Amino acid sequence: MPQILELIQDDHDLIRSLFDELESNPETRDVRCITLRRELPGHMYAEEATLYARLRDVVPEEIQRSLEEHDEVRKRLIRFEKIPLRDDAWMPALHELRGDVEAHFASEEGGVFARAERHLSRSTLFELSEAFQQEKEAAAQITIA
Ligand SMILES: [Fe+2]
Ligand SMILES: [Fe+2]
């Protein structure tokens, strides 16, 4: 798997493990929520600025669908964050958010990755990995500010 796709896969794995922890460990929920708030939007923003931007003209319908999924996840995250940690609605809302995120990750890992490997050169994928890191760092600065 070429470089940027490895970085994206690593993020997906990290976010999945955050959800595991959020579901299973009440003690660390407040901290993990902060990490999720940084990692999930930063990941989507960096994808849009790099991989999606390169693939948009090549496979427009697939990228349009992915962008719509990002919007759904963002809206779901905003709704989730309005619910207090101790509220009965918190866990169902976490499951709904995770459901949307997992479905989106599956469509990337099962479809977008293959498109990227087919349509972009190895050197482009390598260049994009650096840009992906930079965009994530930039997004993290905005989140902190
Ligand atoms: Fe995505
Ligand atoms: Fe992703």
Image: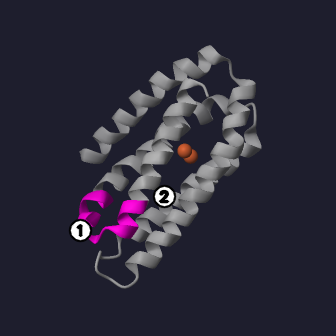
Tell me where residue 139 sits by quadrant. Answer: top left
Say which residue appears at 68% left-offset and 18% top-offset. 121
Left or right of residue 17: residue 64: right
Q: Is residue 79 left or right of residue 85?
A: right
Q: Amino acid under label 2?
A: Arg
Describe residue 85's horizontal placement relative to residue 102 as left or right.
Answer: left
| Image location of residue 24, percent across then percent down | 37, 68
User: Between residues 123 and 62, which one lies in front from this camera angle?
Assistant: 123
If the picture is divided into quarters, which one holds ligand 2?
A: top right
Q: Which residue is mark 2?
A: 74
Quarter holding the C terminus is top left
State whether residue 56 appears in this view: no
Of mark 2 and mark 1, the one earlier in the sequence is: 1
Residue in the image at 69% along x and 23% along y: 120
For the residue labelled by badge 2, is the local secondary structure a helix, a strand or a loop? Answer: helix
Query: Which residues lie in the magenta part?
Result: 20-33
Residue 42 location in percent, x, y?
A: 41, 44
- The residue at which mark 1 appears reads as 27
For this orientation, the residue located farthest to the top is 123
The x and y percentages for residue 91 are: 41, 76
Where is residue 111? Give x, y as percent: 72, 43
Give amino acid for label 1.
Glu
